[in-house]
Image (tube, rainbow, N blue to C red):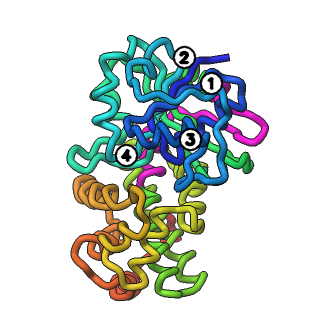
Amino acid sequence: MSKISLLGAGTWGTALGIVLASNGHDVTIWTKIEQEAKELQENRKSLKKLPQAVLPDDVKITLDLEEACTDKDLIVMSVASPYIRQTAHDASPFIKNGQKLVNVAKGIEDKTLMTLSEVIKNEIPQADVAVLSGPSHAEEVSRCVPTTVVVGAETSETARFIQDIFMNEVFRVYTSPDIIGIELGGSLKNVIALAAGTVDGLELGDNTKAALMTRGMAEISRLGIKMGGKMETFSGLSGFGDLFVTCNSKHSRNWKAGYFMGQGKTMEEAMKQVNQVVEGVNSAHAALILANKYEVEMPIVEQINLVLFEGKPAKEALNDLLIRDRRREYSTLEW
């Protein structure tokens, strides 16, 4: 049995708390929101976020960050991406040297263009930081629906340690050394999911959505490889796998926001209706800056930025994608 804390009591932190508790670990979930802590303590569930998921009685809930970070075998960073830096900063004084920490949030910090593991290392340099990602909606993980993810770490020892802690008969974990590829796949797919949602909001067909997802994956891999990721990662669980589930599931907050924009709502109206953090919005802006920095062509990312931040109608953005100049699918393939 390992002692594990999850920093963040949202849908993902709650779902992973259930997984870890079912594996026999000593689990603590930290939140800074008093009402959230009270609800989880009294009801053992989040009535609004995950009403069907019940936390085991032995999962501890705390508002004390020092308690959550002290004497733990593993710390799971499960707050939403906009709150990663502040949470890491606040936790840093309580983190021991060599502390194993795995980030499960997905995103790119807009101001710095850092991946979230880089943000955490910036605030907690003494920690051994890993990442976990893949096609894994919290709503299904909390109900023990069979799920497969990948953990990336700087050493195989750390990756295997986290693999052993999480893995069970319904939650399968693979390992990889490609941290940057895993993070970029998990972050950029949210941007493509916004675009996929607009396709569904416009009531277009399977052909259109399949084309957008396929070309979206081409954009993700082009940028990801330029930034040091591996093609195998982008064709794997945290790349195509996560893209597929996020673009096609009504559990996806990014898909929902895109769907509402496809129906004519503004970005602000769509986010208000989703009523949760839509991580693809921040990642979209960061992705566009990275595309320019690395001189990578990303037309879908460009168009979704225009829809998000400049009020361009989703239908017009799609039309502009379709009438682009003709070209080869892959320029690396020779006749």
Crowd band around label 1 with a 10 angstrom C-alpha radius: few (<14), some (14–19), many (20+): some
Q: What residue is disc 2 on?
A: 73
The disc, 3 or 4, on the residue closer to the chain's N-terminal end is 3
Q: Is residue 89 above or below residue 315?
A: above
Crowd band around label 2 with a 10 angstrom C-alpha radius: few (<14), some (14–19), many (20+): some
Q: CA distance from mark 3 to mark 1?
A: 23 Å
Label 2 or label 1, whichever lies nearer to me, is: 2
The disc, 2 or 4, on the residue closer to the chain's N-terminal end is 2
> CB of mark 3 within 8 Å of CB of mark 2?
no
What label does residue 69 carry, if any?
Answer: none
Q: Is residue 217 above or below residue 24?
A: below
Q: Nearer the viewer, residue 110 or 291?
A: 110
Q: Seen in the image, is 232 located left or right of residue 109?
A: right
Q: Seen in the image, is 171 located left or right of residue 154?
A: right
Give the residue displayed 60% in from the left and 42% down from the top: 43
Q: Nearer the viewer, residue 274 or 179?
A: 274
Tell whether position 50 is magenta.
no
Q: CA distance from mark 3 to mark 2?
A: 19 Å
Q: What residue is disc 1 on?
A: 160
Q: Amino acid at mark 3?
A: Thr
Q: Amino acid at mark 1?
A: Arg
What label does residue 81 carry, if any?
Answer: 4
What segment is highlighted magenta in the picture? 163-187
Q: Quadrant of residue 209?
A: bottom right
Give the residue displayed 41% in from the left and 29% down from the top: 63
Q: CA distance from mark 2 to mark 4?
A: 23 Å
The disc, 2 or 1, on the residue closer to the chain's N-terminal end is 2
What label does residue 14 carry, if any?
Answer: 3
- The spot of residue 199 in percent (x, y) is 48, 80
Q: Nearer the viewer, residue 250 or 232?
A: 250
The disc, 3 or 1, on the residue closer to the chain's N-terminal end is 3
Q: Amino acid at mark 2?
A: Asp
